[in-house]
Amino acid sequence: MMSYYYGNTTRGIPGLLGDPYYWWETGAMFGALVDYWRYTGDSSYNAVTTQAILHQASETRDFMPPNQTKSEGNDDQVFWAFTSMAAAEYGFPDPPEDQPQWLALTQGVFNTQARRWNTETCGGGLRWQIFSLNQGYHYKNSISNGGFFNIAARLGAFTKNETYFEWAEKAFDWVFDIGLIDGQTWQVFDGTDSLINCTKKDHIEWSYNTGVFLYGAAVMWNQVSIEPPAASCSNVS
């Protein structure tokens, strides 16, 4: 996998695979390396992983780097948050003291996305795209909202801050109520269009949409089963 990565070479940009690979795929790749360290104890790739994550975190410390402003969506941003959240959960070696820490980076993503929660149409939800000039800005999809649900649930479990659990429930319930999760079959559909107030759905299914909801729902279930006072996903049985 690392043979595809040149971001740590003289002419490379840390945290970028380059064409034809997308920015979010690099985030997922370094998430795999965090997992690799966790399960093997091999620290061979730790330095390059830390360099890549911190570089793409950008000066705003929320994975909104200037080199991605033409195409970055909420789903792209949250894939890097999955990686920083895993680093916090696993106890991946801390960045230098003058750099943002793993938890803070994940919280930075959560804070930016919570501010983007859009109630102008469909009763809520996150748009796919962040910037209005990008194609897909009017699309409200499962991976963006599922990713937000996922990190909210995990931040709640990690910090014990009830606000994160409340947002996790809010995001899950919106997806369920709007019909992107089928209440009978539990299929997760791709998205819907805010221009028609989310009255029709794109019924294509992708496994990662299901995956982010399964992970987040498992985290929320653990809070209920282990700590009864904590919030839960009201529609998850």
Image: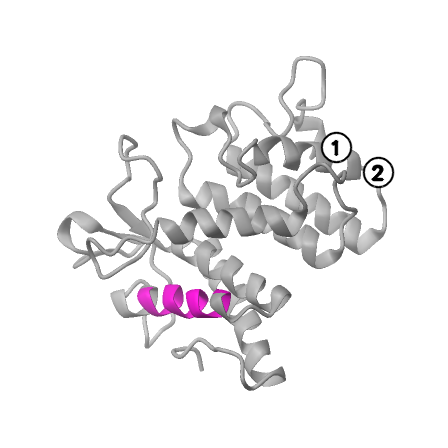
Residue 18 in the image: state x and y as whole percent: 56, 23
In the displayed structure, 191 sits above or below 71; it is below
Residue 64 in the image: state x and y as whole percent: 49, 35
**What amino acid is at disc 1?**
Val
Residue 118 shows up from this direction = yes
Q: Which residues are magenta?
A: 164-174
Label 1: how many Cα within 10 Å (few below 14, some 14–19, many 20+): some
Instruction: Report the coloring of the rendering.
Output: one colour
**What amino acid is at disc 2?**
Ser
Asked whether 165 falls inside the magenta stretch, the response is yes
Residue 80 lies in quadrant: top right
Image disc number at residue 154? none
Which residue is found at the position 72% from the left and 47% from the top?
34
Q: Which residue is mark 1?
A: 48
Residue 169 in the image: state x and y as whole percent: 41, 70
Front: mark 1 or 2: 1
Which quadrant is home to the C terminus? Answer: bottom left
Which quadrant is home to the N terminus? Answer: top right
Q: Which residue is mark 2?
A: 44
Is 201 placed left or right of 158 in the picture?
left
Element type at mark 1 = helix
In the displayed structure, 92 sits above or below 123; it is above
Q: Residue furthest top?
A: 11
Is 22 placed left or right of 174 in the picture?
right
Kindly indicate whether the residue at mark 2 contacts the one at mark 1 (C-beta within 8 angstroms).
no
Asked whether 1 falls inside the magenta stretch, the response is no
Is 1 placed left or right of 68 in the picture?
right
Q: Nearer the viewer, residue 180 or 84?
A: 84
Residue 101 in the image: state x and y as whole percent: 68, 46
